[in-house]
């Protein structure tokens, strides 16, 4: 609709200018024209054609400018507007003394020309300074605005929202991850997950009741420490029966990441094109890698399968088989890694006691 209005206005204006321009001709020429009205109509039609061309050009230019403005982040538009206004103010302040100078009447066009040139020059200067130092200006006003500006420009990617499931909350490691700062973005806890935690906390089974209360305690601590990031969402789906199905649907609808420890839920979510962050996968990824020759300290807890072997465990649960460790059960020993083996049950490290390694060396 706006495009048609722009074109029609240009057509009407140009036709009117052409129609009325006949009156500007000298009188001696008009007296030679036998039919002035016909000439008016011809010139008016020609003006309408010119107006149509100008209107199409103006409409195309307007749409390009509109698209450019829409693509610009609001912070850029704001800083450029401020720079433009300051440029105009500076131009007026600069020209004020010049306008007081006596200028001959034959040079009267100088003042308006200087005003136009100065306004253009200082406006361009103000916009250029805004593009160069706009981020610094925004940082002075709001220290957090620079981050939102970079996100709007596409320089930074916004942190994705995470949806927490019941197992992840009860596990408790998400609380420690939040404290370290490795988890970014907002964490949503759907209301049906909260209901499941409450149901577990009220269960007759002692183990379930303990797990449910632990999850509620962890969630309360997380909300108290990060009230703006850990949010309870009231969403629920009456037509979906299981909590897992609700979680996948909710994460899919809001394009969020699903944070869980449940292996089967991870597989189902991946099949439905929902991105999953599994805390167990993260735990496996950050486990220290021991190479042959590395030294580690551990406690020998029990004898191994072989008569001379002793078995201990690292903090992450990795089993370490120590040669000549059978007689050191219950003692803290320093061992040197000889090899590592990845099995279906997990990782296993083979080592020699430090004293044995020195004796053999």
Image: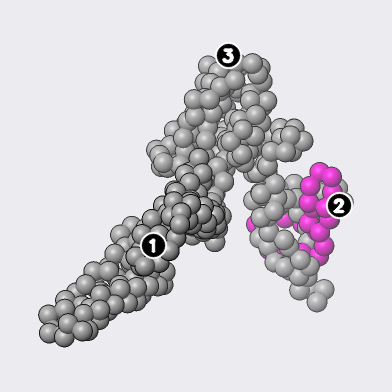
The residue drawn where x is 12% and y is 80% is: 100
Q: Nearer the viewer, mark 3 or mark 2?
A: 3
Q: Is residue 129 left or right of residue 89?
A: right
Tell me the crowding category of disc 2: few under 14, some 14 to 19, or many 20 or more residues within 10 angstroms, Cα based: few
Query: Sequence order check: which comes first, mark 1 or mark 2?
Result: 1
CA distance for labels 3 and 1: 111 Å
Q: Is residue 348 left or right of residue 95?
A: right
Assess whether residue 342 is covered by the magenta stretch: yes
The residue drawn where x is 31% and y is 62% is: 82
Query: Sequence order check: which comes first, mark 3 or mark 2?
Result: 3
Q: Which residue is mark 2?
A: 307
Tell me the crowding category of disc 1: few under 14, some 14 to 19, or many 20 or more residues within 10 angstroms, Cα based: few
Q: Position of residue 65 (x, y in %)?
A: 49, 57
Query: Sequence order check: which comes first, mark 3 or mark 1?
Result: 1
Q: Secondary structure at mark 1?
A: loop
Q: Position of residue 196 (x, y in %)?
A: 57, 22
Q: Position of residue 257 (x, y in %)?
A: 62, 41
Q: Which residue is mark 3?
A: 204
Q: Which residue is mark 1?
A: 31
Q: Which residues are magenta?
A: 323-350
Quarter location, residue 357: bottom right
Quarter location, residue 252: top right
């Amino acid at each position: 609709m706006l495009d048609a209005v722009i074109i029609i206005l240009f057509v009407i204006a140009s036709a009117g200018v052409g129609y009325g321009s006949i009156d500007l001709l000298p009188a001696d020429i008009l007296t030679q024209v036998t039919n002035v009205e016909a000439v008016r109509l011809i010139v008016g039609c020609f003006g309408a054609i010119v107006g149509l061309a100008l209107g199409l050009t103006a409409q195309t230019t307007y749409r390009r400018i509109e698209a450019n403005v829409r693509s610009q982040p609001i912070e850029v538009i704001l800083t450029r507007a401020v720079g433009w206004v300051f440029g105009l103010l500076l131009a007026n302040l600069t020209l004020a003394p010049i306008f007081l100078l006596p200028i001959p009447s034959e040079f009267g066009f100088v003042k308006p020309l200087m005003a136009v040139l100065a306004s253009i020059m200082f406006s361009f200067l103000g916009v250029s300074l805004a593009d160069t130092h706009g981020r610094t200006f925004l940082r002075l006003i709001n220290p957090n605005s620079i981050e939102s500006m970079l996100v709007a420009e596409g320089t930074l990617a916004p942190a994705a929202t995470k949806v927490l499931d019941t197992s992840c909350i009860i596990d408790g490691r998400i609380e420690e991850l939040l404290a370290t700062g490795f988890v970014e973005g907002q964490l949503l806890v759907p209301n049906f997950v909260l209901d499941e935690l409450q149901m577990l906390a009220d269960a007759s089974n002692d183990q379930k009741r303990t797990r449910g209360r632990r999850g509620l305690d962890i969630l309360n601590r997380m909300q108290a420490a990060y009230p703006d990031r850990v949010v309870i969402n009231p969403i629920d789906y009456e037509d979906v029966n299981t909590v897992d199905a609700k979680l996948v649907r909710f994460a899919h609808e809001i394009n969020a990441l699903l944070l869980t420890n449940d292996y089967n839920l991870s597989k189902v979510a991946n099949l439905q094109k929902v991105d999953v962050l599994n805390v167990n996968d993260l735990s496996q990824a950050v486990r220290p890698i021991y190479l042959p020759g590395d030294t580690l300290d551990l406690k020998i807890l029990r004898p191994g399968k072989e008569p001379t072997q002793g078995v201990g465990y690292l903090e992450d649960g990795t089993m370490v088989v120590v040669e000549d460790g059978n007689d050191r059960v219950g003692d803290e020993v320093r061992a040197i890694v000889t090899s590592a083996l990845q099995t279906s049950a997990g990782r296993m490290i083979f080592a020699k006691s430090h004293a044995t390694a020195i004796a053999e060396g």
